[in-house]
Amino acid sequence: MDIICINGPINAGKSTVGRRLAGLLPGTAFVDGDDHDAPDGAGLNTRIAAGLARIEALIAAAKNDLVIAHPLRPQDHARLAVAAGRCGARLFVVTLAPPIDVALADRGSRTLSAAERARIVEMYAEGYAGPAFSDLVLDNSAQTPDQAAAAIAEALARPRG
């Protein structure tokens, strides 16, 4: 079983590409990390903790592959690696890393708020666009979501090791 985490800063395309990837992989479920049980208006740390707890529970209950769209810090990656290991799954992290000017632009139907733009700058400074734990770093700025998903599916199909 594979747990595929689509990582990256805000507006990198995690949810869109993740949904398309799950659609390419038979029997694979998609999990949007933005869907969490934190109360409306909760602070960032509360939202992160709630999202990770939900994702860990979904990994523990998984019977098939999962694609998860969620930005990861090193400590978050470590938590998900433990959760995947408990159920004998491989954690495969794909980091979407468009140039910052692309992430800061309104893409598709999404209009970014000032707070989101500020957080994008912080996330690039914090290394979300290229952490060492990534199995694949993909500049998806010149790709459609379908092309990015196909590139990830191809990387997943390569022999392990």
Image (spheres, rainbow, N blue to C red):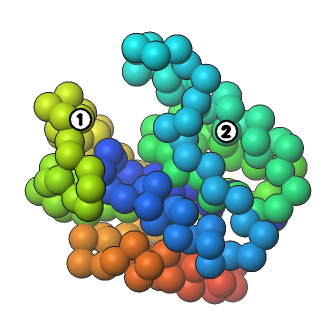
Q: Which residue is mark 1?
A: 116
Badge 2 element:
helix
Which amino acid type is shown beneath numbered disc 1?
Answer: Glu
Q: To which quarter of the image does residue 141 belong?
A: bottom left
Q: What's the residue at 28%, 39% (across, down)?
A: 123
Q: Which residue is mark 2?
A: 55
For the residues labelled 1 and 2, the Cα–Cα distance comes to 23 Å
Question: What is the number of the mark on residue 65?
Answer: none
Q: What's the residue at 64%, 56% (across, down)?
A: 30
Residue 126 picture location, percent across and down: 29, 38
- Say if residue 156 shows up in the picture: no
Which amino acid type is shown beneath numbered disc 2?
Answer: Ile
**Lateral position of residue 3 relative to residue 64, left or right:** left
Q: What's the residue at 22%, 59% (across, down)?
A: 107
Residue 102 picture location, percent across and down: 17, 60
**Quadrant into which the N terminus falls:** bottom right
Residue 69 picture location, percent across and down: 52, 51
Q: Residues within 10 Å of mark 1 (few under 14, many from 20)?
A: some
Disc nearer the start of the sequence (1/2): 2
**Lateral position of residue 107 relative to residue 148, left or right:** left
Q: What's the residue at 14%, 54% (across, down)?
A: 105
The answer to which of 158 and 111 lies nearer the viewer is 111
